Amino acid sequence: MSEPSVAVREEVPEVGAAVRRAAVRRALAVLVLVAAAALVPLLGPPLALDGTGEARPPGVAVVTLLRITMFAALCVLVGESAAAWLARRVPDAPGGTPRSWGLVAAFVGAASAVGLALIVANGNLVPGSLDELHPGRLYETTDGLLALLEVNAFVAAGFCARSRRPGTATVPLAAVIVAEALRAHPDLGREDDPLLGSLLTLVHLTCAALWAGGLLQVLRTMRAWRARPTAGAALLGRYARVAAVLFAGVTATGVCSTLRKLPLESVFTTAYGRVLIAKLLLVAVIAALAVTARVRLRRSRDPYAAIAPARVEVLVLAVVVAVSALLTAVPAPVWWERPLWG
């Protein structure tokens, strides 16, 4: 009778050690993400602008950091809604769900949107003192009104996330995406059809947020369902099928937007082109990881065989979000001739 108890006593420390190692790995992953989020706005603009002859926009590091946090918050909120929708369609799905990050994400998104709005109100310059804060000017310009819309939409998404129907947060989140799409293509005479550019950005940002945020929340849900690995694998499989469509949407709209905004001969001679190349390389890595995860999911007998590449994919997607934020902060490319199309 004593032998089983000895075996149990020997296994418990091993289980505890495994849990501690997993916690350490997650903490290191978070530290890597925080470091990347800090390095991109600090080192990204100087590297991208070096030797291009383009002037460094004022406050580009601050703008990049604010956009990183705002895009990350948007991805988390959109991902929670998308993963919840997928989870409801898994047969015999467990009842447990991961703790919602919606309220925190909405607060971070609103705070970032407020910071960006104050910069817009100050003539797109980072305020250096309280005397340079002019929030009332936001009502005088289109960019200002769009910035206010984003602030209010994130606040509304926070209230929705804490309500009995968190799925209603999709409405204010859609408003944020629409505002970003319109902001990215102001009618300044640089585009023949800015509405087409806004439509491309709308689809691109929607697909990207669903892709990145959805995978994060799916992995969190699988952890909550670890007692039911078959259901977790089914959820990841459903996400993989949707992600293939999202990847196609991101790729197609990204290519079209690039052809409209960037002269091909300026890819390596402009900050926008250099950042875009970095983003494309990261997306290629993500595509390889996604294919690896899908192959493992189909061929392995272990339902959670695809977890490792999927986790790495989330980390690289986080870096892509940071690079995308930098892409919106560097100087826009200038066409000296009429674009080939658009």
Image: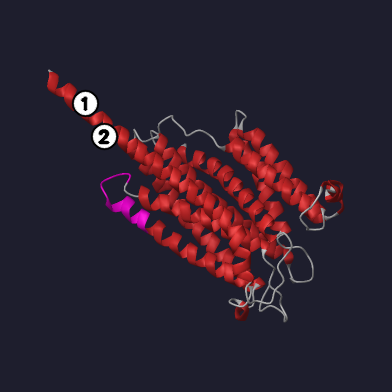
- 193 or 305, which lies in front? 305
* Residue that carries the numbered disc 2 in the rendered image: 14
Q: Which mark is residue 8?
A: 1
Quadrant placement of the N terminus = top left
Q: How many neighbours does mark 2 have within 10 angstroms: few (below 14), some (14-19), or many (20 or more)?
A: few
**255 to 208, vertically: above or below:** below
Left of 222 or right of it: where is 50?
right
Q: Position of residue 319 (x, y in %)?
A: 52, 56
Q: Is residue 208 visible?
A: no
Query: Number of numbered discs present?
Result: 2
Stretch in magenta: 292-304
Residue 269 place in picture, x, y as percent: 62, 78
Rendering quarter of residue 111: top right
**Residue 315 locus on image (x, y percent):** 47, 52
| Of residues 203 and 112, the one drawn nearer to the viewer in this rendering | 112
Residue 14 in magenta stretch: no
Q: Secondary structure at mark 2?
A: helix
Pinpoint residue 140: horizontal percent, then vertical percent: 87, 52
Q: Residue at x 71, y 75 (%)?
A: 334
Residue type at mark 2 is: Glu
Return the disc, 1 or 2, that comes first in the chain's sequence.
1
As drawn, is 77 to the left or to the right of 342? left
| Magenta stretch prevailing secondary structure | helix
Q: Are marks 1 and 2 in contact (CB under 8 Å)?
A: no
Q: Is 296 covered by the magenta stretch?
A: yes
Residue situated furthest front in the rendering? 129
Label 1 neighbour load within 10 Å: few <14, some 14-19, many 20+? few
- Going by the numbered disc 1, the residue's amino acid type is Val
